[in-house]
Image (tube, coloured by chain):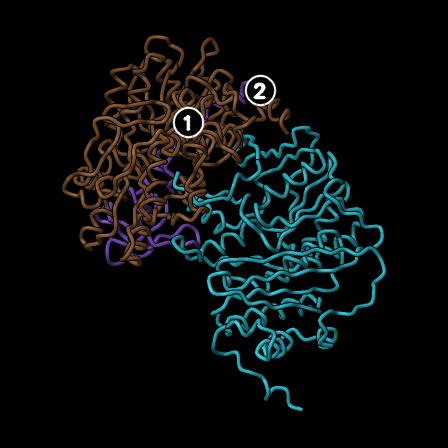
């Protein structure tokens, strides 16, 4: 459940509102659920509300973890000569 | 799309597939329940199952708010729109769900009820402002993710003195449902639902944090990995679950660290507990009555509670008899075990909620996965 | 005689019941608005019916009712859409469209200035397409009984000799070509819908495709199937073809052209671009051996710049449209169930 998508904050507006951009698409959303949102932050958008900030460091760390899986594949390929 | 496209990359998927196949022990099967419909959707939408070894099986859980809303509550919403003449605001997801006698919001709308599809609770407030002489009711559904926006709307309505706005609250809680599934006789005593581990909710957890799952990881000795909704997140989380199972661990791990912390969104939690309180019990479609599994509006905000503002009649709400949604939602049966699946029940003519929501296990099977299931023959037979 | 001086002004005021009443107000509206903008020798005869010579060859006819909200949208309006939609339906038989007719149903109270904008846009579209509107009709309904303007257009065309385009000619092994990016029209419309508003530079792809079709059939007269994937999007069109010909299809998701902004808007609203409407794209099935030649012809045309080969026809009694996902798995691309609604989960 709970369709949500990360988007970049491009402007902060009165009344806990903000404008976010996803590629060239811009939408007004509420940031009433977050403290200290800044322009440039990536936030997770669900039903027109920002639920949480997205951490760039953690995203990079997760991708690095996933990439570790590749090492095994390469090793297997070396052993089997690419047959894996 | 940053933070989206990277987590759909094919080259990493291939590598993870090799790793999963290498680490999954061939002499056993891994039954992993994805609680959330979001995971179900990702698995089918991207064909993740194709990248899994034979012995890694997904069991689809009840984590779709549309699927678990009991028919009676939907019938009540229709009544609010039809008999009380309110403007009923609903998320698009609920529009086609069949209630008693297949009556849905979209049918009620066609018959003249004023039902409006909205994208955000802000839209419902706007409609209330623009129609001061009409009662505007927001049909609130959803898990912990969708609840804080409802709380914001109620607080905002109070601040603005928006007296014609109220909320028909059907918000439900995830951890109690997971606990209920694990505690059910089918799982605990009969062992008919084999679950070796859980893919934990992603966006729900961004609000409640990973901490609430620690209790049942320990209590039921099942590993939980909080998993993002992108397909690579699902694969990495499967790998983490396999490792826990292999090592005999039953811990809460967090794969979705870019959005989920242990404590979650404290501001959202505070808002929710200010506006809502626990219901002693709430009916879930498919699970029956689940204690302390839902929220209602606190007395302090009773003025905005549609259940207090309007009196709905007691009704004999009915599901289609042979619909297996209840068993499917608990993971006891697969969509293809249901006699109605693909015969009388299809996404065009859904009998049960699992076929309506695109996240429902039946709709996902039908739309994305039926070519790999025996149901294919069934589909041919009726085509 | 100076016609212009006599013209009634349509810069202000609203449609009222007299505009459909058969009296002078109606005659003035027809003369000063419809005829003035849509003028051509056949319409100028001013008869209730258009008299035309029977053209040589096989005739095709198609009719299409146009209702859309909002009436004006990024990249077009109901006027241009009413021309393009019907021209494309005619063109999808491989035909060269020759004539159009237009029937208007106007709602009492509709601003005359908006009506003029729509008629001018229609005239422009017909002129650009080189296909005249040769007869028409206007009716007015009471306020509340219409949605501003409904326009029904009918198109007449001729099919070149040797061209035999039909959905039931889809055969296993044929290539599936798509003329460009999907979902542009639907997203442009949704961006202006109440309660969904979002900003985007995406324009509707509304366009007349008969020019592109003419070059395609000239290059490969043996084209098996042509369809424009409008309502229900690419998914609905491919399913219709598969059912008509009792075949299946295998698509390659990575090959399907999609603008990043359309993809983003769909992610935001929970929509699948495969099901989002197009108004200026076509799907073409042809023999594998002709595919590259046809693709080159399409890419050289202004309406086919992003054309791609997106898959092939398979032998499948269940008529399933399957797709290799960009992720490396396989999924089914089913019919759309009901209307595609923005969703939260």
Query: Mark 2 sits on what residue?
Result: B374
Quadrant (top left/top right/bottom left/bottom right) for the N terminus of chain C: bottom right
Query: Mark 1 sits on what residue?
Result: B319
Identify the secondary structure beneath mark 1.
loop
Q: Chain of mark 2?
A: B
For marks 1 and 2, give the CA distance.
26 Å
* Percent x, y of residue A76: 52, 20
Give the purple chain's letter.
Answer: A
* B70 versus A83 height, above or below: below
Sequence-wise first label, 1 or 2: 1
* Percent x, y of residue B90: 36, 44
| Quarter-of-image position of residue B352 | top left
Foreground of the two, C19 or B192 = C19
| Quarter-of-image position of residue B261 | top left
Q: Is residue C73 visible?
A: no
Q: Colour of chain C?
A: cyan
Q: Colour of chain B?
A: brown
* B166 versus C124 height, above or below: above
Q: Is residue C137 visible?
A: yes
In the rendered structure, the answer to whether residue B351 lies left or right of residue C66 reads left
Foreground of the two, C305 or B357 = B357
Q: Residues within 10 Å of mark 1 (few under 14, many from 20)?
A: some
Mark closer to the observer (1, 2): 1
């Amino acid at each position: 459940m709970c369709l949500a998508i990360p988007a970049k904050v491009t402007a902060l507006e009165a009344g806990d509102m903000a404008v976010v951009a996803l590629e060239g698409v811009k939408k007004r959303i509420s940031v009433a659920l977050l403290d200290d949102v800044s322009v440039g932050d990536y936030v997770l958008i669900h039903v027109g509300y920002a639920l949480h900030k997205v951490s760039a460091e953690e995203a990079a760390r997760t991708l690095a973890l996933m990439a570790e899986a590749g090492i095994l594949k390469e090793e297997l390929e070396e052993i089997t000569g690419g047959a894996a | 799309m940053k933070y989206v496209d990277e987590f759909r990359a094919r080259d990493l998927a291939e590598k993870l597939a090799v790793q999963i196949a290498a680490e999954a022990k061939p002499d056993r099967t891994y039954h992993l329940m994805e609680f959330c419909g979001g995971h179900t959707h990702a698995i089918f939408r991207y064909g993740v199952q194709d990248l899994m070894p034979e012995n890694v099986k997904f069991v689809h859980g009840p984590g779709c708010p549309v699927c678990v809303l009991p028919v009676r509550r939907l019938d009540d919403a229709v009544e609010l729109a039809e008999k009380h003449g309110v403007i009923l605001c609903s998320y698009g997801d609920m529009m086609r769900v069949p209630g008693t006698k297949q009556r849905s919001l979209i049918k009620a709308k066609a018959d003249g009820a004023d039902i409006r599809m909205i994208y955000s609770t802000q839209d419902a407030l706007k409609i209330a402002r623009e129609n001061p002489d009409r009662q505007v009711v927001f049909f609130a559904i959803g898990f912990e993710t969708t609840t804080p926006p409802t709380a914001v709307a109620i607080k905002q309505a109070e601040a603005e003195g928006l007296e014609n706005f109220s909320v028909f609250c059907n918000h439900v809680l995830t951890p109690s449902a997971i606990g209920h599934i694990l505690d059910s006789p089918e799982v605990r005593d009969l062992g008919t639902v084999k679950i070796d581990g859980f893919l934990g909710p992603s966006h729900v957890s961004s609000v409640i944090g990973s901490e609430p799952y620690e209790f049942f990881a320990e209590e039921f000795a099942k590993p939980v990995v909080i998993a993002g909704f992108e397909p690579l997140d699902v694969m990495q989380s499967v790998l983490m679950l396999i490792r826990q199972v292999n090592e005999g661990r039953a811990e809460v791990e967090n794969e979705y660290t870019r959005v989920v912390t242990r404590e979650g969104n404290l501001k959202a939690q505070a808002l929710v507990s200010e506006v809502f309180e626990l219901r002693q019990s709430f009916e879930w479609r498919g699970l029956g009555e689940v204690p302390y599994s839902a929220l209602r509006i606190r007395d302090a905000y009773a003025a905005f509670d549609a259940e207090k503002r309007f009196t709905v009649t007691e009704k004999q709400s009915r599901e289609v008899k042979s619909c297996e949604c209840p068993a499917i939602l608990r993971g006891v049966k697969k969509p293809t075990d249901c006699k109605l699946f693909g015969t009388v029940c299809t996404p065009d003519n859904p009998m049960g909620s699992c076929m309506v929501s695109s996240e429902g296990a039946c709709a996902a099977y039908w739309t994305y996965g039926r070519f790999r299931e025996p149901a294919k023959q069934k589909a041919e037979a009726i085509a | 005689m100076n016609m212009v001086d006599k013209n009634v002004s349509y810069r202000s005021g609203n449609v009222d019941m007299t505009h459909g009443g058969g009296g002078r107000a109606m005659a003035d509206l027809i003369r000063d608005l419809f005829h003035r903008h849509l003028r051509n020798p056949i319409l100028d005869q001013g008869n209730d019916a258009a008299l035309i010579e029977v053209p040589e060859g096989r005739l095709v006819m198609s009719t299409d009712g146009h209702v859309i909200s909002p009436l004006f949208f990024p990249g077009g309006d109901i006027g241009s859409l009413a021309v393009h939609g019907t021209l494309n339906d005619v063109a999808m038989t491989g035909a060269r469209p020759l004539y159009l007719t237009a029937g208007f149903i106007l709602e009492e109270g509709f601003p005359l200035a908006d009506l003029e904008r729509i008629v001018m846009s229609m005239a422009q579209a017909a002129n650009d397409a080189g296909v005249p509107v040769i007869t028409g009709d206007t009716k007015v309904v009471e306020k509340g009984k219409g949605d501003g303007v409904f326009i029904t257009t009918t198109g007449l065309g001729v099919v070149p000799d040797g061209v035999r385009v039909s959905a039931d000619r889809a055969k296993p092994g044929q290539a599936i070509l798509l003329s460009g990016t999907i979902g542009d029209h639907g997203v442009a419309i949704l961006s202006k819908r109440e309660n969904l508003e979002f900003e985007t530079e995406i324009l509707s792809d509304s366009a007349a495709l008969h020019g592109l079709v003419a070059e395609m059939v000239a290059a490969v007269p043996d084209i098996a199937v042509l369809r424009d994937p409008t309502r229900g999007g690419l998914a609905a069109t491919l399913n219709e073809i598969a059912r008509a010909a009792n075949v299946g299809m295998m698509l390659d998701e990575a090959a399907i052209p999609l603008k990043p902004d359309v993809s983003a808007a769909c992610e935001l609203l929970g929509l699948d671009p495969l099901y989002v409407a197009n108004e200026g794209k076509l799907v073409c099935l042809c023999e594998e051996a002709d595919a590259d030649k046809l693709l080159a012809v399409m890419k050289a045309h202004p309406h086919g710049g992003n054309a791609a080969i997106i898959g092939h026809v398979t032998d499948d009694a269940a008529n399933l449209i399957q797709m290799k996902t960009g992720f490396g798995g396989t999924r089914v691309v089913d019919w759309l169930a009901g209307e595609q609604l923005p969703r939260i989960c």
